[in-house]
Amino acid sequence: MPGPAPLRRPFDEVDAQAIAAIRGLGIDAVEKANSGHPGLPMGAAPMAWVLWSRHLRTCPGDPDWPDRDRFVLSAGHGSMLLYALLHLAGYPVSLDDIRNFRQWESRTPGHPETFATPGVEATTGPLGQGAGNSVGMAIAERTLRARFPGLVDHRVFALVSDGDLMEGVACEAASLAGQLGLGRLVWLYDQNDVTLDGPASLSFSVEDVAARHRALGWHVQTVADGDHDLEAIDAAIERAVAETGQPSLVVVNTTIGYGAPNKAGTSAAHGAPLGGDEAAAAKAALGLDPKTAFAVPEAVRERCAERARQGEAARDAWYGALDRARTETPEPAAELERRLRNGLPEGWDQGLPAFGPEDRLATRDASGKTMNALAARVPEFFGGDADLSCSTKTALNGLGSQSASEANGRNLHYGVREHAMGAAANGIAYHGGFRTFASTFFCFADYMRPSVRLAALSGLPVVYVWTHDSVGVGEDGPTHQPVEHLMSLRAMPNLHVVRPADANETVEAWRHALGRTAGPTALVLTRQKVPTLTTPEAARGLQHGGYVLRNPQSALRAVVIATGSEVSLAVAAAERLDSEGLGVRVVSLPCWELFEAQSPAYRESVLPAGIPRVAVEAGATLGWERYVGSGPVVGVDRFGASAPGAEVAARLGLTEDAVCAAARSVVGS
């Protein structure tokens, strides 16, 4: 729904007081914490105030109102700008919270965190990520608006810095936004020409950022005097909002640390407190009382309360429209409400594929079949890949593709932009209304790692479909054969790394991934075909992270633990050893994180104490000591080679003979 018209009153003394108050809160909080970045809040305060007081449609009393505008502070180091805005706007961020800036368990951490502070839309700080998040949010808004016209109608704003726009992820994201024609996206570029090490000319002087974005399909404007010219800022934002065919960049020239007599315009104002004398002098220059900290004039509070009431009216009008839709179009209304609650449709996981012993297929193929079955039942299932759907098998067949002229497609063509794909997928998840996935080769998960880490930190239910999971890739060679990736990603808190053994485990992996709402899940899948070892019922053991796949006929002497394609190797070795009278249990351990969440009694039932263990996995052996102690691990502690996959595996020791030898060694046979 359209928001209220921007306030038409001329800018006045209250606006000046508000901008000074924002700057003062930034100075005071950083000084009290003796840590932080005062320069950006001081320099960007005018553009931020104009946006928040005249254009941004939010409801501070209902921070999660679904049809609110989104504001992302991509330059998250300037977090005090956002905390000051949230406080003034009426969000539950108090002056005491601001006094506790950067302190233990405060609502005002060093960089914005969605889970810590009401009103923060994205966890930012790693530069460029918030810019990418905003593109994902704009994709989500556009796609929801196409599905639910009249109930979804908002905009996405981001404040980006010189550092953000130096990062490759922001350039990739800008390219994607231009390609898709995301006309509801506006970036305000705080161009202060200063970085942490000194003037931006040291590293960022020959590039014409405005021209680059025009070339990427953006509508671009420049505000020459972002320190004083509020009318120009206001008019530029208004024009950007009116431009619905292209994303918009507003380049605003500012002075970092504005008002500081000795440090303004220099890197000394960037990443450290101003210091007592400089802070006092800056406050005096800004018309603030140097002896009074954390002050907000009452006239500013009244102006912000007026804006908050406008937000409440817009929120109430939206809920009124939703009430009418419940009567006039009940099915779409119910679907939208369910999706915004992050709930899945009833029976969403019924009718998924089931595979039998005659089926031999790559787990990437089993994943593709499962994804298409899910897409038929889960309309919010939506995502894409880095120009690899033909290889990762992630295309949702017959469900259309996103483009500048098509918002209803369920397939996102991210192109060869893994960095932006990861950040945009996070933005889609932050926005809400979708269950999204992103896909590439497992080796290139490294390109996505900063975004994956932020998804794990923020509890975003993004699903990563990473295929070509081992040296079994074969001829493409070591550049495309992941070795260290499994262990490095298992080290990341709150990321569930799932490497299924066969087709039925792959189905269960998707059941877990789509049902999980508290964090991201990585599905690590094979290129090569593997046998179907499980029944659909037995594969349910994946929901426990690990389970007994095979027990011996004779007395239990050893346990072989394996994941993914090596489970079939473990089974073959166990069968041979069993025929020799050496009883070996095979445990499939597709998800360490899920297994560790089980009760001690369950884990003991799978991996009984006192029984020696062996592990086998086509990756780095570091970390397996958690489960095998000093026992042997059949793995790969070197880079691979270019040759047929089976030959590479054999030459690197991933063989039935090697597993048998390892098992014999632990029982002294």
Image (spheres, helix red, strand yellow):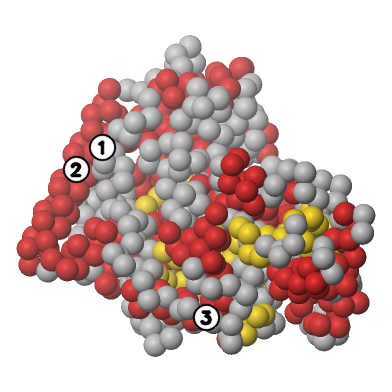
Dot 2 falls on a residue whose secondary structure is helix
What is the quadrant of residue 609 in the picture?
Answer: top right
Mark identifier at residue 355: 3
Placement of 532 over or under 71, stated as above or below: below
C-alpha separation, residue under disc 1 versus residue under disc 2: 8 Å
C-alpha separation, residue under disc 1 versus residue under disc 3: 51 Å
Question: If you read the primary sequence from the N terminus, does the residue marked by circle 1 or circle 3 appear first?
Answer: 1
Mark identifier at residue 290: none
Amino acid on which the number 2 mark rests in the picture: Glu
Give the residue pinned by disc 2. 312
Q: Residue at x 58, y 22 (%)?
A: 33
Q: Residue at x 82, y 63 (%)?
A: 582
Residue density around tag 1, few if under 14, some if 14–19, many if 20 or more, within 10 Å: some
Q: Residue at x 59, y 82 (%)?
A: 357
Residue density around tag 3, few if under 14, some if 14–19, many if 20 or more, within 10 Å: some
User: Relative to the observer, which residue lies in front, 17 or 380?
Assistant: 380
Horizontal and vertical percent for residue 643? 86, 85
C-alpha separation, residue under disc 2 versus residue under disc 3: 53 Å
Residue 581 visible in image: yes
Question: If you read the primary sequence from the N terminus, does the residue marked by circle 1 or circle 2 appear first?
Answer: 1
Q: Quadrant of the N terminus?
A: bottom left
Amino acid on which the number 1 mark rests in the picture: Gly
Q: Are marks 1 and 2 in contact (CB under 8 Å)?
A: yes
Q: Residue at x 26, y 41 (%)?
A: 62
Give the residue pinned by disc 1. 61
Q: Is residue 253 left or right of residue 468?
A: left
